[in-house]
Image (tube, rainbow, N blue to C red):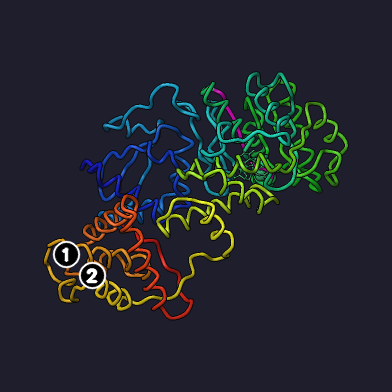
């Protein structure tokens, strides 16, 4: 297998940060590149939850970044602790205890249609129709007065599953952290006891799998799948309403687990008594453990959440910017997160650290990425005037600083304001390849951060180029490799 160049991998991460800030997470730094085999770039992560998340959620972005950086047609595959293949490579073994999901904690994939693999009794988290997010851990959960009880109850359940509160029933409005809390429980449990069999499933999947099992005459499999576990978590159980047969089946599933002292955790948008058409016997089952409510976050909690959502993206959101967001977005936490994503995108697009001013701009404009359309001629004109160079020099092979620097500025501006690819920009400025353009973008970004005078020059050129653009249209992109 061809070994990857570490610098190439760093470029891939850099490219992702510039072009897919929304996808990027701080923990991407822990991904270990393994090598290239048959056009597939392989990388290793030490947690099954992360591996599955990367493969399902991020493969397209990584593929795009790999292709842009290497100029080769590559695809990507993420290996994890359960991949025998990884053991035959130089992939590092996961350090003991470092894994939120547990180094042995397996994630069992469901096949298409949400069917889980034929049930085996090996430990791990199975995910029916849902994907566990590596972000949804206790570490990333901000505790405030509005969710303190639910958080404490979830921790207590992790400390002694099946014994403390059974079932644990968490309810609250949309976007208040129910799913986050359930997934945090999954990750904490599997980290402490990798042999534990956990099934985390949406209510919808429970119903679908039930109907499919009935039609296929495979009720034994179905029952085995749901009852032969140590912990069953069902998200959004309120969807069970109005399905008589499914309610009946769930009643028996519940009883079987409960009698076996297996932990049941349910989330819902309403308390058991308020779920319409829920059979009385289920209402009373749901109430026999602990029912806790999650409420909308207060201002202080919101401020902390904004900072936390920034941190997991590797973004430092200063206090005043976090306060500004918390003041302006109060409805639900998903919207707070949306605000952080907007701020992140603008910060990358403008190459600026997050500040109160940037937060304000990001939230004021619904579409911060819409800018005047700029042509390559606008860019050349601005740069030629400022640096007193000739176009023929910019397009030549000459490398002296007085030409190479303005050429790099052109490349940076072209990447920021036009849709041209790295190859096209490189080709235009003297038949250079995409790696030269990437290098130029990095050099300009670096200098911009360390040299305030240059920063001002670049901003002025940027303004001139924008002013020369003619009217709003098109989406510009960040200057990136
Ligand atoms: P629900 O399932 O209640 O609709 P989610 O669990 O999907 O809500 O939460 C929506 C978003 O808000 C997620 O990104 C989640 O991480 C975030 N969130 C909710 N509560 C918290 C919290 N206390 N700390 C940090 N993030 C939170
Ligand atoms: Mg949810």
The verdict on residue 202 being magenta is yes
Q: Are discs 2 and 1 less than 8 Å apart at CB?
A: yes
Find numbered disc 1 in the image and state the secondary structure of the residue it sits on. Answer: helix
State the residue in front, 340 or 294.
340
Whether residue 210 is visible here, answered yes or no, is no
Asked whether mark 2 lies closer than 8 Å to ligand 1, one says no
* Of the image marks 2 and 1, the number of the one nearer the N terminus: 2
State left or right for residue 274 relative to residue 267. Answer: right
Q: Is residue 133 above or below residue 349?
A: above
State the residue in front, 249 or 200.
200
Q: Which residues are magenta?
A: 196-203
**Most extreme residue toward the front, as rendered?**
453
Quarter holding the N terminus is top left
State left or right for residue 131 relative to residue 55. Answer: right
- Residue at image coords 66%, 29%: 227
x and y, in percent, of residue 100 in the image: 50, 29
Q: Residue 437 falls in which quadrant of the image?
A: bottom left
State left or right for residue 106 relative to residue 143. Answer: left
Q: Residue 440 falls in which quadrant of the image?
A: bottom left
- Residue at image coords 27%, 57%: 438
x and y, in percent, of residue 140 in the image: 56, 35
What residue is pinned by disc 1?
402
Quarter holding the C terminus is bottom left
What residue is pinned by disc 2?
387
């Amino acid at each position: 297998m061809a070994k990857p160049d570490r610098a190439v991998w760093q470029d891939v991460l850099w490219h992702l940060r510039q072009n897919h800030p929304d996808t990027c997470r701080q923990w991407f730094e822990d991904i270990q590149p393994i090598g290239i085999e048959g056009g597939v770039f392989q990388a290793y992560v030490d947690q099954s939850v992360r591996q599955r998340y990367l493969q399902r959620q991020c493969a397209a972005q990584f593929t795009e970044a790999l292709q842009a950086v290497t100029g080769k047609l590559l695809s990507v595959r993420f290996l994890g602790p359960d991949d025998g293949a990884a053991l035959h490579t130089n992939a590092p073994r996961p350090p003991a205890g470092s894994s939120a999901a547990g180094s042995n904690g397996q994630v069992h994939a469901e096949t298409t249609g949400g069917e889980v693999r034929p049930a085996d009794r090996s430990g791990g988290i199975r995910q029916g129709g849902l994907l566990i997010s590596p972000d949804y851990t206790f570490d990333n959960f901000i505790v405030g007065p509005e969710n303190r009880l639910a958080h404490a109850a979830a921790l207590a359940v992790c400390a002694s599953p099946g014994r403390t509160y059974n079932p644990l029933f968490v309810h609250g409005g949309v976007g208040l952290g129910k799913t986050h809390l359930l997934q945090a429980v999954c990750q904490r449990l599997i980290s402490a006891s990798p042999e534990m069999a956990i099934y985390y499933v949406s209510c919808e999947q429970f119903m679908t799998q039930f109907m499919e099992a009935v039609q296929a005459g495979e009720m034994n499999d179905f029952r085995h799948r749901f009852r032969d576990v140590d912990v069953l978590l069902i998200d959004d159980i309120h969807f069970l309403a109005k399905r008589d047969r499914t309610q009946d089946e769930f009643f028996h599933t519940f009883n079987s687990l409960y009698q076996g002292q297996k932990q049941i955790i349910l989330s819902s948008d309403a308390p058991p008594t308020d779920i319409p058409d829920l059979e009385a016997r289920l209402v009373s089952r749901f109430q026999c453990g602990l029912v806790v409510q999650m409420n909308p976050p207060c201002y202080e909690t919101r401020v902390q959440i904004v900072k936390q959502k920034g941190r997991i993206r590797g973004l430092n959101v200063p206090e005043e910017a976090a306060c500004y967001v918390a003041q302006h977005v109060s409805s639900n936490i998903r919207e707070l997160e949306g605000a952080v994503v907007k701020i992140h995108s603008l910060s990358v697009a403008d190459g600026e650290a997050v500040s109160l001013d940037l937060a304000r701009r990001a939230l004021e404009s619904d579409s911060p990425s819409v800018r005047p359309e700029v042509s390559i001629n606008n860019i050349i004109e601005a740069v030629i005037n400022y640096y007193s160079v000739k176009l023929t020099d910019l397009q030549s092979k000459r490398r002296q600083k007085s030409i190479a620097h303005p050429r790099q500025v052109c490349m940076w501006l072209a990447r920021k304001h036009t849709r041209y690819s790295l190859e096209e920009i490189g080709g235009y400025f003297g038949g250079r390849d995409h790696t030269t353009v990437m290098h130029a973008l990095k050099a300009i970004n670096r200098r911009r951060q360390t040299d305030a005078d240059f920063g001002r020059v670049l901003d002025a050129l940027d303004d001139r180029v924008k002013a020369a653009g003619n009217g709003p249209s098109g989406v510009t992109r960040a200057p990136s490799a």
